[in-house]
Image (tube, rainbow, N blue to C red):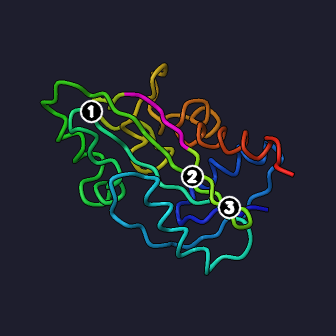
């Protein structure tokens, strides 16, 4: 049993669905934890683990994800949650109104604590920012992000469709490979 520590119900639903399909049991630990302002997602989850290790018994998983816009050198990146709260999707669309590129990517960093071990897994999804908001599903920047190879935004997709493309799904695949991999004696 792995506790997924997040206040984001959408993240929990996506990850729990993929892990359940693989036979991994997960429980939602609906709580927040400190997120430092850092230049990389991995630094954020590694710091959070230093706090959560003393607060959570058993195995747990945490996630930090961000939207990286090519037109702004990767901004908002690790500051995505803050930018979404302050500007929303409409604000990001305004920022990109005269941009030469609408290329973007989502990235995820998971940290899994099992016993004393802390392992980090990454996932990335390339795409573009749509001309306007589309769809009512998902959360965060999902209504404006179109993954490479798709015509719908994440918000127009079902969870199953989104999991075919998403950064978080790719991080889950790396996590599952680790869980299924050979164990040291």
Q: Earlier in the sequence, mark 1 or mark 3?
A: 1
> Measured from the top left, where is residue 143 in percent x and y?
40, 40
| Residue with the mark numbered 1 | 70
Magenta range is: 122-127
Q: Residue furthest bottom?
A: 54
> Measured from the top left, where is residue 38 in percent x and y?
34, 59
Q: CA distance from mark 2 to mark 1?
A: 23 Å
> Measured from the top left, where is residue 153 in percent x and y?
44, 32
| Residue with the mark numbered 3 | 117
Q: Give 113 or 124, whichever is nearer the viewer.
A: 113
| Residue with the mark numbered 2 | 110
Q: Earlier in the sequence, mark 2 or mark 1?
A: 1
Q: How many C-alpha atoms fall within 10 Å of the one at disc 2: few (<14), some, or many (≥20)?
A: many
Q: CA distance from mark 2 to mark 3?
A: 13 Å
Q: Earlier in the sequence, mark 2 or mark 3?
A: 2
Q: Secondary structure at mark 2?
A: strand
Quadrant (top left/top right/bottom left/bottom right) for the N terminus: bottom right
Q: Residue at x 51, y 44 (%)?
A: 137
Q: How many C-alpha atoms fall within 10 Å of the one at disc 3: few (<14), some, or many (≥20)?
A: few
On whether residue 125 falls in the magenta region, the answer is yes
Quadrant for residue 29, please give it. Answer: bottom right
């Amino acid at each position: 049993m792995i506790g997924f520590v997040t206040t984001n119900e959408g993240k929990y639903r996506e990850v729990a669905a993929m892990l359940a399909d693989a036979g991994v049991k997960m429980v939602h630990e609906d709580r927040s934890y400190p997120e430092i302002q850092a230049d990389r997602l991995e630094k954020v989850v590694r710091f959070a683990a230093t706090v959560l290790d003393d607060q959570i018994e058993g195995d747990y998983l945490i996630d930090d994800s961000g939207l990286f816009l090519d037109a702004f050198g990767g901004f908002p990146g690790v500051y995505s949650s803050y930018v979404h709260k302050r500007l929303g999707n409409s604000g990001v669309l305004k920022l990109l109104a005269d941009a030469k590129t609408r290329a973007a990517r989502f990235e995820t960093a998971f940290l899994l604590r099992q016993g004393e071990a802390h392992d980090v897994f990454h996932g990335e999804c390339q795409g573009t920012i749509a001309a306007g908001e589309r769809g009512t599903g998902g959360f965060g920047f999902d209504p404006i992000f179109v993954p490479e190879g798709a015509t719908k935004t994440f918000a127009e997709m079902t969870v199953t469709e989104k999991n075919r493309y998403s950064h978080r799904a790719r991080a889950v695949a790396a996590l599952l490979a680790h869980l299924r991999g050979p164990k040291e004696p």
